Image: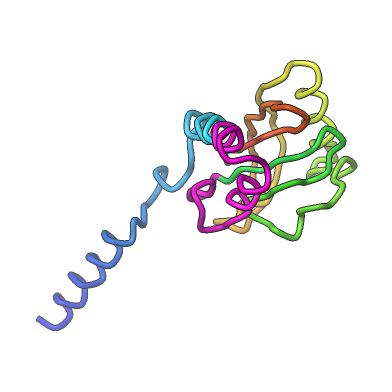
Amino acid sequence: MKRYLSLVFASMILAFSGFTFGAGAKGTAAEATAMVDKAIMYIKKNGREKAFAEIDNPKGQFVDRDLYVVIYDLNGKVLAHGSNAKMIGKDMIDLRDSDGKYFVKERVEIAKTAGKGWQDYKFMNPVSRQIEPKSMYLQKYEDFIVGCGIYK
């Protein structure tokens, strides 16, 4: 009986904590696109300083499971990052993924030429702590790039 109650209690904790299993733990392309749109609307409404601070907040509204918003200037410098505050202020233009792809250069090029789009590369998943294939939706807004990616 004691073991049964322990299992019931553990199940309740997981249920109320919002923990999800399997595919539900990963963000979707639609959710990533919506998060970018939401971030741009937040910037328009609240200004860059307040918006960037909210995007940098790991417990804020722009971080959800393995989804998080990043913002770069058009030279590849990180202006805001929902998963890794150590990257803020760093020039990442020459950063390569595990396959040698200059993914920040490509991101800047997509923003400058198309204004928005999807990009494939490899990056460390903050949830699994493993290098995984990733696709990022990015959109140019004013003089910077707003992006949110999904792990495949």
**In this view, 129 is above or below 75:** below
Q: x, y percentage for residue 5?
A: 15, 76
Q: x, y percentage for residue 38?
A: 52, 34
Residue farthest toward the bottom in the current orientation of the protein: 2
Q: Quadrant of residue 69?
A: top right
Residue drawn where x is 69% and y is 28% of the image: 119
Residue drawn where x is 75% and y is 60% of the image: 86
Q: 23 or 53, which is in the foreground?
A: 53
**In this view, 63 is above or below 101:** below
Q: Quadrant of residue 46?
A: top right
> Which quadrant is home to the N terminus?
bottom left
In the image, residue 82 lies in the stretch drawn in magenta: no
Residue drawn where x is 67% and y is 51% of the image: 124
Left or right, 141 with respect to 105, comes to left
Residue farthest toward the left in the current orientation of the protein: 1
**In this view, 114 is above or below 76:** above
Can see residue 26?
A: yes
Residue drawn where x is 30% and y is 63% of the image: 14
Q: x, y percentage for residue 134?
A: 64, 38
Left or right, 21 with respect to 62, comes to left
Q: Which residues are magenta?
A: 39-67
> Which quadrant is home to the C terminus?
top right
Left or right, 14 with respect to 70, comes to left
**In this view, 15 is above or below 10:** above
Q: 45 or 64, which is in the foreground?
A: 45
Q: 125 or 54, which is in the foreground?
A: 54
Left or right, 105 with respect to 82, comes to right
Residue farthest toward the right in the current orientation of the protein: 94
Q: Quadrant of residue 77?
A: top right
